[in-house]
Image: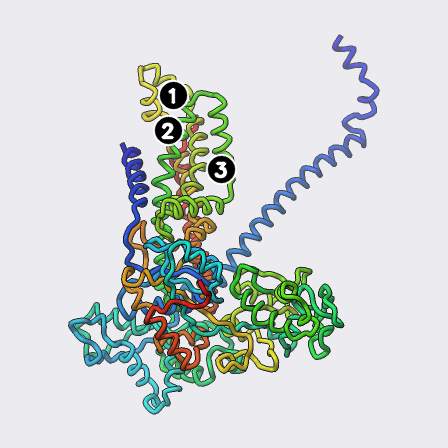
Amino acid sequence: MTSTIMTQPTAAETRLGWESAEVRRRIRRRHAANRRLRLYGIAAICTAIGLLATLVVSLVLLGSPAFVQTKLDMPVLLNAQHVDPAQPARGNYRAIVRSSFLSLFPEGAAMSPRDQRALFRILSNGAPLAVRDHVVANPGDLGKTVTLSVPLSDPFDQLNKGKIRRDLPENRRTVTDRQLAWFDHLDAQGLISMPFNWAMFFNSDSRFPELAGMAGALVGSFYALMVCFLISFPVGIAAAIYLEEFAPRNRWTDVIEVNVNNLAAVPSIVFGLLGLAVFLNFFNMPRSAPLVGGMVLSLMTLPTIIIVTRAALKAVPPSIREAALGVGASKHQVTLHHVLPLAMPGILTGTIIGMAQALGETAPLLLIGMNAFIVEPPGGILEPATALPTQIFIWADSPERGFAARTAGGILVLLGFLVMMNMVAVWLRKRFERRW
Amino acid sequence: MAYKTLFIAAVAATAFAGAAQARDQIRIVGSSTVFPYTQAVAEEFANSTGKKAPVVESTGTGGGMKIFCQGVGVQHPDLTGASRAMKKSEQELCKKNGVTSITEVLLGYDGLSFATSRKGADMNVTKPQLFLALAAEVPVNGKIVKNPYTKWSEIDRSLPDTKIQVFGPPPTSGTRDAWVELVMEEGCATFDAVKALDKQKHKEVCQRMRQDGPFIEAGENDNLIVQRLEADSSAYGIFGFSFLYENKDKLKGARVAGVEPSFETIETGDYKISRPLFFYIKNAHRGVIPGLTEFVSEYVSEKSMGPGGYLSERGLVPLGGDKRKEVQQNALQSKQMARHAM
């Protein structure tokens, strides 16, 4: 039987032997298709990397000037007649700074008030505050001359960073020719420096770009994420455990499951509207509070955590449950002592990714008023605060040049946090993941 | 055990928030145009008095009115900024919710600029010409027709021979309201064909911006408009004067009736497109919210809203002497606003 089949090939086989030109062509075509598919893949990845690189490079180029600040190392005479030693915080530091600054210019005292006003535009409004902070910290320095590093105002910061072109006619610049000459006079004496801008991390928002920082937003985001975690993590895990381990399979649990999956896809602004209507207008919770922000964000992360937790629980093999039940453990012992700990790495990874999403979320926070101008970090979850993305939003809308760099700088900081959180998630997965 | 603690903490936090709590900080909402000025006063107030700085939120004029008029009590804001006067409907909403005693403060003026890239052509334009370029319906040969103009030079031969392309704010913006009131309506009223119309039709013709392409609503972010103008030198943009001032190396303002926009020309009133800015005080909150009275007196002080004050550094055009004194007095004495008969 077999031999007849082998010795008598069909007509088609005779025509298309392995050596025939037709088959070779087909093989070549198949190989070419393979190569093309691979090329498409490589091209797609290159496009994605190219786009990401463009984004990061443009952000770094635009945002890096925000991380340095032009400062003036000014010898300041801490004239004791302007400051009451009993109340060093309430002194007239503006007068101290002005007289010290004027003395840097030979013609200083002889200037008209109008010229003096133009001259003082060089210094930031934060300069008297920097001197005040120094005196409050070192009350013994009163009456002495100390050299303090004080910030310059935004136009001169931009000038020093090369963002304002000197060759433009005077009426197209925010600094006048005389101010340029004064600035060059200071620069020639070696008083201008450009150190790292710690204010970006330790100051809160300000109307002056040279004083504005992200401290308030960082603390606000921290509180909001903490609230979000405290709500969504336990609730999410409890819900997932019930659905996965206890719930009967019937129409109701199906409905719940479909709804949880749908909620995960709801645009975040909808949760913001819900927060506005329910938390603020109905329960009269405070506007702009990280508590409300965290609650709204937890609505958004909850479905993600439930889905991730269910997947992690499902991945624990039934043999573990059966073995535990077999030695007499009750259902809740099985779940809490065996299944949940084994599923924890997966759950944590998913939670961190959900939190990272919540960190970058802007739309719902805008609706509950977390995009306010607030000059100090919140002291608790009930105090008004901004969050990182809403701070970026506020800066993006401000006219001063310095805020453009700060916007990009803020985005870089936010991206840094996101990358860090995702790296922790990857590390957790690598470190604790178990294969069955 | 750990989960139990988390649960309790979460529940406690939620329950805790339900109780309304006293407020030791002023809360301000309102127009994004007044926002930078209020920001400045808030920071100055905190620095000079050592009190907690007010929380200032930029919600837009209309949004601010809605929140402001929600009621009296610590959960409602104390002040709202506006780039136009409070409407009658808004005052009625306030009244309905128990906010009856309101003081209106006219802060000063803010210039609107009609600007283009430095690379673009110089432009000298009048309000009627701007109306013809931007309205949905315009008078042509004594008849009201759908706007036929696609190039500036078709309106007047002195204008550049480029297509009309103007980026402007959306209807929710106070800047848009101001533009319609100051440019469109005034430009519109100069035409005889319009004067003959009945009141309803008159309003419709004078207030509707064209929807057929040349006028592009560009969202609330003025920095975005600035970027688009840089990219296209034949396009124009409508935004607050402070944005033009900050970007004067890249942009130039069109002269309106021969006058270039600048701090000086806006202050003297020679530059004709400037709008009043207001803020409204909820008088029931005075003496209840700590610092509110002091904040108001800081806001209306000479060193902030006066000539050469720190608000003028940010672009505000101060009121003239007598008017300013009156406003300052009214603000300090909580004078009830008398804009709409109630």
Where residue B7 appears, as percent x and y from the top left, is 31, 36
Q: Chain of mark 1?
A: A
Along the viewing direction, whichever of A293 and A391 lies nearer the viewer = A293
Secondary structure of the residue carrying tag 1 is helix
Along the viewing direction, whichever of B167 and B233 lies nearer the viewer = B167
Residue A292 is at least partly visible in this image: yes
Return the disc, 3 or 1, that comes first in the chain's sequence: 3
Along the viewing direction, whichever of A108 and A234 lies nearer the viewer = A234
Q: Chain of mark 2?
A: A
Which of the 4 image quadrants contains residue B208? bottom right
Q: Chain of mark 3?
A: A
Return the disc, 3 or 2, that comes first in the chain's sequence: 3
Where residue A34 appears, as percent x and y from the top left, is 67, 37
Secondary structure of the residue carrying tag 3 is helix
Look at the numbered discs 2 and 1 and tell me whether their residues touch, using CB distance below 8 Å: yes
Look at the numbered discs 3 and 2 and tell me whether their residues touch, using CB distance below 8 Å: no
Label drawn at residue B330: none
Which quadrant of the rendered structure holds the C terminus of chain A?
top left
Along the viewing direction, whichever of A62 and B97 lies nearer the viewer = B97
Where residue A79 appears, as percent x and y from the top left, is 22, 80
**In the rendered image, residues at marks 2 and 1 fall on the same chain:** yes
Report the amino acid beneath label 3.
Answer: Leu
Q: Mark 2 — residue? A: A342
Q: Nearer the viewer, mark 3 or mark 2?
A: 3
Q: Residue at x 20, y 76 (%)?
A: A83
Label drawn at residue A263: 3
Report the amino acid beneath label 2.
Answer: Leu
